[in-house]
């Protein structure tokens, strides 16, 4: 691997790292020589991930909607590894429901985890990311770019993350922090398998036309954004969603 694409020696926090994309990103960063802090709401789940990675991984239980827990997460990271270079805001949640059926509590919960969680983690980590210049990688979704029926709460929260990414990239550029975002399409995670019955084993990585990706492919994009290779990419949302779904002919 060319050196500019590497993350060796960096310290990264990956939220929502107990499975799926977050777990694979943490493994990828660690394999390349980074220190990784994996977190989710259940300690035992991230303990398993950290144990599989090895000595350069730290597992921390953290609910990203709890400001005190987020502060403890960042404090534990700096205490263990001496600083923080990369923050991957991957923690998220959703459920399918028509707009009329979403309760105030359900709406608030999804917005709180996805959007407010990103706010809490980024703001708390800010002073350490600015110490030497760091990278924030937010996770949005194509639902936040083009809408998604029966996921209006999720799409609205992810759209907020995309806007926050661009705004914060401008505000923090002077401090040497790059803020970018990844917007995945359908990715073969345990969550997608439970909802749609599609598993990673069914995906042909050689098929360019596929509409479902792998967590490893999202990790590739995130490693690029965390590395010096993306030094001129600031405030952008990179869409990783396979072949685009376009209108080929007008409907009568």
Image: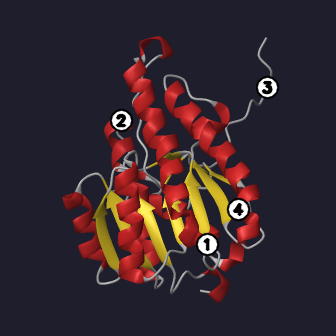
Q: Which mark lies nearer to you, 2 or 4? A: 4
Q: Write down the residue under mark 1.
A: 134
Earlier-in-chain disc, 2 versus 4: 4
Camera-near label (2 vs 1) is: 1
Label 2 CA crowd tier, 10 Å (few <14, some 14–19, many 20+): few
Which residue corresponds to mark 4?
Answer: 172
Which label's residue is closer to the chain start, 4 or 1?
1
Position of residue 83 relative to residue 169, above or below, is below
Residue at 58 percent across and 31 percent down: it is 156
**Do the numbered discs 3 and 1 sit on residues whose CB atoms are within 8 Å?**
no
Horizontally, is 150 left or right of 129 in the view?
Answer: left
> To which quarter of the image does residue 52 belong?
bottom left
The answer for how far apart the CA atoms under marks 4 and 1 are is 10 Å
Q: Nearer the viewer, mark 2 or mark 3?
A: 2
- In the image, taking residue 139 as reference, residue 40 lies left or right, namely left
**Residue 12 at x, y = what percent?**
47, 72
Give the labeled residue for mark 2.
195
> Dot 3: what SS?
loop
Give the image location of residue 147, x and y in percent: 62, 29
Q: Tag 1, which secondary structure? A: loop
Q: Is residue 232 left or right of residue 153?
A: right
Q: Earlier in the sequence, mark 2 or mark 3?
A: 2
Category of crowding for the residue at label 4, using alpha-carbon neighbours closer than 10 angstroms: few (below 14), some (14–19), many (at least 20)? some
Mark 4 or mark 1, which is nearer to you?
A: 4
Image position of 252 (left or right of 113): right
> Can you identify the residue that label 3 sits on?
249
Residue 233 shows in the view: no
> Which quadrant of the view contains residue 134?
bottom right
Which secondary structure, mark 2?
helix
From the viewer's side, name the closer residue of 13 and 19: 13
Image mark for residue 38 = none
Q: Secondary structure at mark 4?
A: helix
């Amino acid at each position: 691997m060319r050196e500019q694409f590497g993350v060796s020696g960096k310290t990264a926090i990956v939220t929502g790292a107990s499975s799926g994309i977050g777990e694979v990103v943490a493994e990828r960063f660690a394999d390349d020589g980074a220190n990784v802090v994996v977190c989710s709401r259940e300690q035992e789940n991230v303990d398993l991930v950290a144990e599989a990675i090895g000595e350069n991984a730290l597992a921390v239980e953290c609910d990203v909607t709890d400001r005190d827990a987020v502060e403890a997460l960042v404090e534990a990271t700096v205490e263990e590894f001496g600083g923080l270079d990369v923050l991957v805001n991957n923690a998220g949640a959703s459920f399918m429901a028509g707009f009329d059926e979403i309760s105030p509590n359900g709406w608030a919960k999804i917005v709180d985890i996805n959007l407010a969680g990103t706010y809490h983690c980024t703001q708390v980590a800010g002073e350490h990311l600015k110490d030497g210049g760091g990278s924030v990688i937010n996770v949005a979704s194509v639902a936040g770019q083009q809408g998604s029926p029966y996921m209006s709460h999720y799409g609205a929260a992810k759209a907020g993350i995309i806007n926050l990414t661009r705004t914060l990239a401008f505000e923090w550029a002077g401090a040497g922090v790059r803020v970018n975002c990844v917007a995945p399409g359908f990715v073969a995670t345990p969550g997608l398998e439970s909802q749609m019955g599609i598993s990673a084993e069914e995906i042909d990585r050689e098929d360019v036309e596929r509409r479902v990706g792998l967590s490893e492919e999202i990790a590739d994009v995130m490693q690029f954004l965390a590395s010096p290779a993306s030094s001129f990419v600031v405030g952008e949302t990179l869409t990783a969603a396979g072949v685009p779904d376009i209108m080929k002919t007008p409907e009568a």
